[in-house]
Image: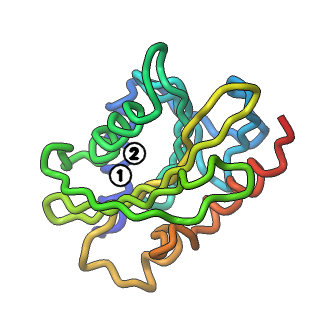
C-alpha cells in the first residue's frame, strides 16, 4: 500500500507543480539542438520555469530531466535551481529541509569533462538522489540527469530498479536515455 501511495503522491505533486497534462511520448523529441527520446514507459511533461523537459517514471518516484539555462542564467545557477526544485517534485518535501552532499562521477561519451555529479540528499524521512551531466549540442550547453526518492526503510532489492548506485549508474531507463542521447550526432 505504501508503494502505491508514494507513486500516487509523486504524480499528483508533479501535476500540481507543473499544472499541465502529461502524455505518453515514445518517438524522439527535438529540444533546441538535441534529440531526446523518452525511455521505456516514462511520460513526458514540460518543466515550469525551466527551458527543458521532464520525463516521469510511472512505476517509481523518479524522473529524467533535461534543461537549458534561461536567458542570462549560468550553468551554475541552473544547477542551484534544479537542486531547489528536485525536493518539490515530491509532495511532502521542502527544499529548505534538504541537506545535499555531492561527489564526482564519470561522464558519458560526449559530456563536458568533469561535469558528472551525484547529489545525495536527505529530507524528513526520505532519501533523494540527483545525478547530472553537462553536454553541448549545436552550440547550446544543457544539463541532463536523473533523480529519485525513496524511504530509508525501502529494501535495497526493491529500490534497485530505480535507485542509482554510488557511481550514478545502474538504472536501466536512465541508461537507455543516455544510450539514445549518445546516438545523437548533432
* Callout count: 2
Mark 2 is surrounded, within 10 Å at the Cα level, by few (under 14), some (14 to 19) or many (20 or more) other residues, namely many
Callout 2: SS? helix
Instruction: Give percent across and percent down for residue 149.
Output: 34, 60
The image quadrant of residue 175 is: bottom right
**What residue is rendered at 41% in x and 58% in y?**
148
Q: Is residue 128 left or right of residue 24?
A: left
Instruction: Give percent across and percent down for residue 183.
Output: 84, 49
The image quadrant of residue 77 is: top left
Can you tell which mark lies on residue 11?
Answer: 2
Label 2 – label 1 distance at C-alpha: 5 Å
Q: Is residue 173 left or right of residue 17?
A: right
Front residue of 109/183: it is 109
Instruction: Give percent across and percent down for residue 19.
Output: 38, 24
Mark 1 is surrounded, within 10 Å at the Cα level, by few (under 14), some (14 to 19) or many (20 or more) other residues, namely some
Location of the C terminus (image quadrant): top right
**What residue is rendered at 26% in x and 70% in y?**
151
The residue singled out by tag 1 in the image is 8
**What residue is rendered at 40% in x and 21% in y?**
49
Location of the N terminus (image quadrant): bottom left
Q: Residue furthest front?
A: 113
Can you tell which mark lies on residue 141?
Answer: none
Callout 1: SS? helix
Q: Is residue 76 above or below residue 161?
A: above
State if disc 1 and disc 2 touch (CB < 8 Å).
yes
Front residue of 101/46: it is 101
Amino acid at each position: 500500500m505504501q508503494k502505491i501511495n508514494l507513486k500516487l503522491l509523486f504524480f499528483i505533486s508533479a501535476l500540481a507543480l507543473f499544472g499541465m497534462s502529461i502524455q505518453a511520448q515514445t518517438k524522439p523529441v527535438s529540444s533546441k539542438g538535441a534529440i531526446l527520446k523518452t525511455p521505456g514507459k516514462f511520460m513526458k511533461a514540460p518543466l515550469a520555469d525551466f527551458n527543458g523537459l521532464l520525463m516521469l517514471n510511472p512505476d517509481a518516484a523518479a524522473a529524467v530531466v533535461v534543461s537549458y539555462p534561461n536567458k542570462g542564467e549560468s550553468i551554475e545557477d541552473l544547477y542551484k535551481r534544479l537542486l531547489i526544485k528536485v525536493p518539490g517534485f515530491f509532495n511532502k518535501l521542502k527544499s529548505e529541509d534538504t541537506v545535499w552532499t555531492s561527489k564526482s562521477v564519470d561522464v558519458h561519451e560526449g559530456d563536458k569533462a568533469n561535469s558528472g555529479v551525484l547529489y545525495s540528499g536527505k529530507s524528513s524521512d526520505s532519501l533523494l538522489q540527483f545525478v547530472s551531466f553537462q553536454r553541448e549540442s549545436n552550440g547550446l550547453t544543457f544539463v541532463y540527469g536523473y533523480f529519485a526518492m525513496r524511504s530509508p526503510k525501502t529494501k535495497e532489492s526493491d529500490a534497485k530498479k530505480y535507485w542509482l548506485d554510488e557511481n550514478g549508474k545502474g538504472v536501466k531507463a536512465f541508461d537507455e536515455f543516455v544510450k539514445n542521447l549518445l546516438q545523437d550526432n548533432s
